[in-house]
Image: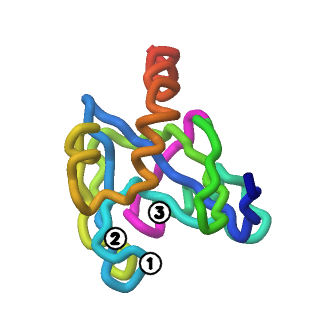
Amino acid sequence: MTETTIVREGVVAIIERSGRYLTITRSQSVIAPGKICFPGGGIEGDETPEQALIRECSEELGVLVEPIRQLGVSVTPWGVRLCWFSAKLSSDDTVFRPNPQEVSAVTWMTRDEMLAHPETLEGNALFFERFEPMLQTTYQDME
C-alpha cells in the first residue's frame, strides 16, 4: 500500500440540527462546482484547525460557529488531510449570508438525502461511515 503525500490540510464542519446536516452547494467558480458537501476549507499559515474552521464558516456562510470536538482525520486520494469537527452555530436564529464566489446554496439535509443525492461529494460519505457515531456521542455529552 502506498502512503499518500500530504499537500494541503483542511477542515470540515459537521453541524447537525434535528437530524439534518448543514450542507452547501459549491459555486461554479470553485473546485467541484455544483457539488453538495459540508462546509469547510483549507488551513492557512499557522492557523489551528479550530481557527480555520471558524474562519472558513465565516468566509463561506457569513456565520459564526463554535467547534465542539474533532471527530477524526482522513486523507483524500489527492493528498488533502482533513480534520472533521462537530460544530454548532453561535445562535439558533443564525441568518446565512453565503459568499457567492464559494457557495451557491445553503441547505439542511438528512443523512439519507445526502447519501442519495447525485451531486453529493463522494468523500462526504466517509463521515457517515466513520465519524457519525462519534457525533451522536458528542451531542449526548452536551445534554
Q: Is residue 76 magenta?
A: no
- What residue would you read off at disc 1? 31
Tell me the residue at 26%/59% (across/down).
Answer: 106
Disc 1 residue type (three-letter): Ile
Q: What is the quadrant of the C terminus in the image?
A: top left
Asked if labels 1 and 2 touch by Cβ distance under 8 angstroms, the answer is yes
Q: Decide: is 123 above or below 135.
A: below
| Up-down relation of residue 16 to residue 29 (above or below) | above
Residue at 44% x, 31% y is 132
Counting other residues with Cα less than 10 Å from the Cα at mark 2, is it few (<14), some (14-19), or many (20 or more)? many
| x and y percentages locating residue 115 in the rendered image | 28, 45
Determine which quarter of the picture holds residue 121: bottom left
- The residue pinned by badge 2 equals 26
SS under mark 3: helix
Label whose residue precedes the other's in the sequence (1 or 3)? 1
Type of residue at label 3?
A: Ser
Element marked by disc 2: strand
Q: Is residue 83 above or below residue 59?
A: above
Q: How many C-alpha atoms fall within 10 Å of the one at disc 3: few (<14), some, or many (≥20)? A: some
Segment tinted magenta in the rendering: 59-69
Mark whose residue sits in front, 1 or 3: 1
Mark yes or no: residue 97 visible. no
Residue pointed to by mark 3: 58
Q: Nearer the viewer, residue 6 or 95?
A: 6
Hey, what amino acid is under mark 2?
Arg
